[in-house]
Amino acid sequence: MTERETWATRAGFILAAVGSAVGLGNIWQFPFKTAQFGGASFLIVYIIAALGIGLPAILAEFVIGRKANLNTISAFEKLGYKEWRVVGAIGLFTGFWILSYYSVVGGWVLRYIGGSLTGAYFAAPAEYFGQVSAGMDALALHAVFMALVVGIVAAGIEDGIEKATKLMVPSIVVILGVLAAFAFTLPGASAGYAYFLSPDFNVLAENFAEIVPFAVGQAFFSLSLGMGAMITYASYIDGDQSLFGDGITIVFLNSFVGILAGLVVLPLLFAQGIDPNTSGAGAVFISVAGAFGDIPGGQIIGLVFFAVVLIAALSSAISLLEVVVSWAIDNYDVSRPQMAVGLGGVIFLLGVPSAIDTAWLGWFDTLAYQLLLPLSVLGILVFAAWVYGAPAIDELMKGSGLGDGVGLTWLWLVRTLVIVAVVATLALGLQTLFLGESPAIVPPL
């Protein structure tokens, strides 16, 4: 077994964790789910979920990872709770599952970068998306995207992931900021701001049971919770830096980027008179792409937009592959590059159905949101708060400079409100999956 790597700097860890969080969940998922579920109504629930559930949950994952300095499965055994390895296994499987179709979407982004240069999707964006989102071309670009992810992870923690995310994360913020400033200048953009920032509480009340699980799931997805990523990244920390401070920074930056993405996408849609209530991937790959064809300099704007989407996708995808690679190199005497290539290949194969038919991608995504993510997060929270308990507070408070009261408050917040919220989210998700005329659990055979 090779010697375990660590982050070179604290900033490296923070940017890597932010990079894991700031991915397609923010720029692809967040705008279209916000549009699909009532704009600001969804935004309010998401922000509450990110701060009230996401922050305590990310701290729980950090505590487990740093204390054990091992991967998401072996960490529980090292802490003295071997029987709880199943929780880590669920997280590892969840990240594995999500990356399989996430990579397909990453392949779409590669296609749209080329399409922006040529203007190929401007005339008929819906038809273009239908042509490139499934089939052999989508499968080939799925392979290209996975190869990029494998290459970064194979290079290691310091030389691969840390160096890449130190470049990626600032680039995402700067480019989105420039695009948001551009969107602000478009005639008609004000309607987009109203839709995004002015809540309709009637919409929230009428669709509460549908909005809540997706908003909480979005918080989990966009913060890389329940996927083993934050446990794994925290396991590479060498020192007693403040996990509390790091967690707040990561949640804030992640939410900021999601909102910034919304300030690009929704004003752009309204400025072009495009209905924002477009479900599925259409809000970015059809509606937004189509809008680029109707604005001055649309080819350049489209190229820049999809370039930042690609950067975000890569920064998140590398964290998901690292989860399984970390487990493998902690337990087997095989080199990191070999493990990255082998496991990346298996994930590619799992993603083949999603590349061939977008109905499969939607099914994979629904199971991740409604079942796998809340189930995994619930297991981690129950372990950290009710099983591990007092040692979790001690680990959280190291290097924080805060009193023990803060840690105790965190513990009881997790034990009560956070766990109840996750259980309720899981229950609503199970209702969607198993009840109704067309249960979502049934695959698109």
Image (cartoon, helix red, strand yellow):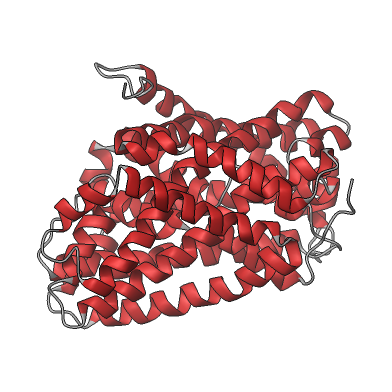
- Does residue 240 appear in this view? yes
Residue 367 at x, y percent in the picture:
44, 31
Quadrant (top left, top right, bottom left, bottom right) of the N terminus? top right
- Does residue 71 appear in this view? no
Name the side, left or right, on which 370 lies relative to 157.
left
Quadrant (top left, top right, bottom left, bottom right) of the C terminus? top left
Name the side, left or right, on which 164 lies relative to 194.
right
* Location of residue 405 with respect to 119 vertically, above or below: above
Name the side, left or right, on which 218 lies relative to 235.
left
The residue depicted at 28 percent of the width and 80 percent of the height is: 300
Residue 140 at x, y percent in the picture:
41, 49
The residue depicted at 34 percent of the width and 67 percent of the height is: 113
Rendered image quadrant of residue 417:
top right
* Location of residue 106 with respect to 377 vertically, above or below: below
Q: Nearer the viewer, residue 256 or 368?
A: 368
Residue 391 at x, y percent in the picture:
86, 43
Q: Nearer the viewer, residue 270 or 208?
A: 270
Name the side, left or right, on which 420 lies relative to 4.
left
Rendered image quadrant of residue 402:
bottom right
Q: Nearer the viewer, residue 1 or 233?
A: 1
The residue depicted at 83 percent of the width and 58 percent of the height is: 5
The residue depicted at 42 percent of the width and 70 percent of the height is: 308
Rendered image quadrant of residue 250:
bottom right
Q: How many marks?
A: 0
Q: Nearer the viewer, residue 306 or 385?
A: 306
Residue 111 at x, y percent in the picture:
33, 60
